[in-house]
Image (spheres, rainbow, N blue to C red):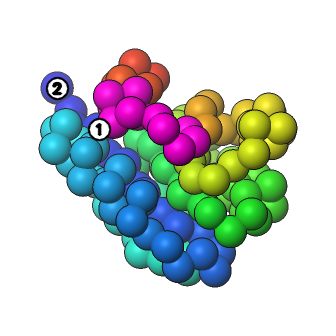
Amino acid sequence: MKKIRVIIAKPGLDGHDRGAKYIARILRDAGMEVIYTGIRQTPEQIVNAAIQEDVDAVGLSLLSGAHNFLFPRVAELLKEKGGNDILLFGGGVIPEEDIDFLKSNGFKAIFTPGTTAEEVINFISNNFRE
Protein backbone atom coordinates (compact mmCIF):
# COMPACT_ATOMS: atom_id res chain seq x y z
CA MET A 1 0.00 0.00 0.00
CA LYS A 2 1.19 3.48 -0.90
CA LYS A 3 2.28 5.76 1.95
CA ILE A 4 0.02 8.77 2.45
CA ARG A 5 1.93 11.95 1.56
CA VAL A 6 1.01 15.09 3.50
CA ILE A 7 2.22 18.68 3.49
CA ILE A 8 1.89 20.64 6.71
CA ALA A 9 2.18 24.38 6.08
CA LYS A 10 2.00 27.69 7.93
CA PRO A 11 0.54 30.33 5.60
CA GLY A 12 0.88 34.05 6.20
CA LEU A 13 2.86 35.88 8.83
CA ASP A 14 2.07 33.58 11.76
CA GLY A 15 5.41 32.56 13.27
CA HIS A 16 4.16 30.17 15.96
CA ASP A 17 4.78 26.67 14.64
CA ARG A 18 4.71 24.36 17.65
CA GLY A 19 1.32 22.91 16.75
CA ALA A 20 2.25 22.39 13.09
CA LYS A 21 5.48 20.62 14.06
CA TYR A 22 3.53 18.45 16.52
CA ILE A 23 1.02 17.43 13.81
CA ALA A 24 3.85 16.73 11.35
CA ARG A 25 5.53 14.49 13.94
CA ILE A 26 2.39 12.52 14.87
CA LEU A 27 1.53 11.93 11.21
CA ARG A 28 5.09 10.78 10.49
CA ASP A 29 4.97 8.48 13.53
CA ALA A 30 1.67 7.08 12.18
CA GLY A 31 3.51 6.00 9.01
CA MET A 32 2.72 8.90 6.71
CA GLU A 33 5.28 10.71 4.60
CA VAL A 34 5.25 14.32 5.84
CA ILE A 35 6.70 17.47 4.32
CA TYR A 36 6.78 20.48 6.63
CA THR A 37 7.19 23.69 4.64
CA GLY A 38 8.11 25.96 7.55
CA ILE A 39 6.64 29.29 8.60
CA ARG A 40 5.57 32.34 6.63
CA GLN A 41 4.60 30.55 3.40
CA THR A 42 2.48 32.19 0.72
CA PRO A 43 -0.54 30.29 -0.63
CA GLU A 44 1.34 30.07 -3.94
CA GLN A 45 4.39 28.47 -2.29
CA ILE A 46 2.21 25.95 -0.45
CA VAL A 47 0.28 24.97 -3.59
CA ASN A 48 3.43 24.73 -5.71
CA ALA A 49 5.00 22.43 -3.12
CA ALA A 50 1.83 20.30 -2.95
CA ILE A 51 1.74 19.84 -6.73
CA GLN A 52 5.49 19.28 -7.03
CA GLU A 53 5.56 16.75 -4.18
CA ASP A 54 2.40 14.98 -5.47
CA VAL A 55 0.81 14.95 -2.02
CA ASP A 56 -2.46 13.35 -0.99
CA ALA A 57 -3.29 15.96 1.65
CA VAL A 58 -2.47 19.51 2.68
CA GLY A 59 -2.83 20.61 6.28
CA LEU A 60 -2.70 24.31 7.11
CA SER A 61 -2.03 25.67 10.59
CA LEU A 62 -2.90 29.25 11.47
CA LEU A 63 -3.19 31.27 14.65
CA SER A 64 -3.05 34.81 13.24
CA GLY A 65 -6.74 35.19 12.36
CA ALA A 66 -6.19 35.38 8.59
CA HIS A 67 -7.67 31.90 7.97
CA ASN A 68 -10.78 33.24 6.17
CA PHE A 69 -8.51 34.70 3.49
CA LEU A 70 -5.50 32.37 3.37
CA PHE A 71 -7.25 28.99 3.60
CA PRO A 72 -9.72 29.66 0.72
CA ARG A 73 -6.85 31.12 -1.35
CA VAL A 74 -4.91 27.84 -1.02
CA ALA A 75 -8.04 25.87 -2.03
CA GLU A 76 -8.63 28.15 -5.03
CA LEU A 77 -5.03 27.85 -6.26
CA LEU A 78 -5.06 24.07 -5.81
CA LYS A 79 -8.14 23.84 -8.03
CA GLU A 80 -6.51 26.08 -10.65
CA LYS A 81 -3.43 23.83 -10.73
CA GLY A 82 -5.37 20.55 -10.96
CA GLY A 83 -5.15 19.56 -7.31
CA ASN A 84 -8.89 18.96 -6.85
CA ASP A 85 -8.23 15.49 -5.45
CA ILE A 86 -5.93 16.74 -2.67
CA LEU A 87 -7.52 16.47 0.76
CA LEU A 88 -7.53 19.82 2.59
CA PHE A 89 -7.65 20.23 6.34
CA GLY A 90 -6.73 23.01 8.70
CA GLY A 91 -6.20 23.77 12.31
CA GLY A 92 -5.31 26.37 14.86
CA VAL A 93 -7.14 29.00 16.81
CA ILE A 94 -10.16 29.22 14.54
CA PRO A 95 -13.50 30.52 15.84
CA GLU A 96 -16.39 28.07 15.68
CA GLU A 97 -18.38 30.52 13.54
CA ASP A 98 -15.73 30.41 10.77
CA ILE A 99 -15.60 26.62 10.40
CA ASP A 100 -18.64 26.26 8.09
CA PHE A 101 -17.24 29.00 5.83
CA LEU A 102 -13.90 27.19 5.56
CA LYS A 103 -15.62 23.86 4.88
CA SER A 104 -17.71 25.47 2.14
CA ASN A 105 -14.40 26.63 0.63
CA GLY A 106 -12.92 23.18 0.21
CA PHE A 107 -11.68 22.17 3.67
CA LYS A 108 -12.85 18.73 4.73
CA ALA A 109 -12.00 19.32 8.40
CA ILE A 110 -10.92 22.09 10.76
CA PHE A 111 -9.20 21.05 13.97
CA THR A 112 -9.21 23.36 16.96
CA PRO A 113 -7.34 23.26 20.28
CA GLY A 114 -8.14 20.09 22.20
CA THR A 115 -8.27 17.85 19.12
CA THR A 116 -6.48 14.57 19.82
CA ALA A 117 -3.67 13.16 17.70
CA GLU A 118 -5.86 10.11 17.00
CA GLU A 119 -8.63 12.29 15.56
CA VAL A 120 -6.25 13.87 13.05
CA ILE A 121 -4.62 10.56 12.09
CA ASN A 122 -8.01 8.83 11.71
CA PHE A 123 -9.41 11.72 9.66
CA ILE A 124 -6.58 11.53 7.13
CA SER A 125 -6.56 7.74 7.01
CA ASN A 126 -10.35 7.56 6.56
CA ASN A 127 -10.42 10.22 3.83
CA PHE A 128 -7.39 9.01 1.86
CA ARG A 129 -8.12 7.74 -1.64
CA GLU A 130 -5.47 5.71 -3.46
The residue that disc 1 covers is 4
Q: Which residues are magenta?
A: 111-121
Return the residue nearer the eye: 44 or 116.
Answer: 116
Q: How many marks?
A: 2
The quadrant where residue 98 appears: top right
| Location of the C terminus (image quadrant) | top left
Residue drawn where x is 69% and y is 49% of the image = 94
Q: Secondary structure at mark 2?
A: loop
Whether residue 118 is in magenta: the answer is yes
Q: Which amino acid type corresponds to the residue marked 1 in the rendered image?
A: Ile
Circle 2 residue: 1
Residue at horizontal 62%, vertical 63%?
63
> Residue at left 32%, top 28%?
118
Determine the image quadrant of residue 34: bottom left
- Alpha carbon of mark 1 to alpha carbon of mark 2: how far? 9 Å
Identified by mark 2, the residue type is Met
Q: Nearer the viewer, residue 125 or 15?
A: 15
Residue 102 in the image: x percent, y percent?
75, 41
Is 2 placed left or right of 105 in the picture?
left
- Left or right placement of residue 8 versus residue 14 in this view: left
Quarter of the picture holding the N terminus: top left
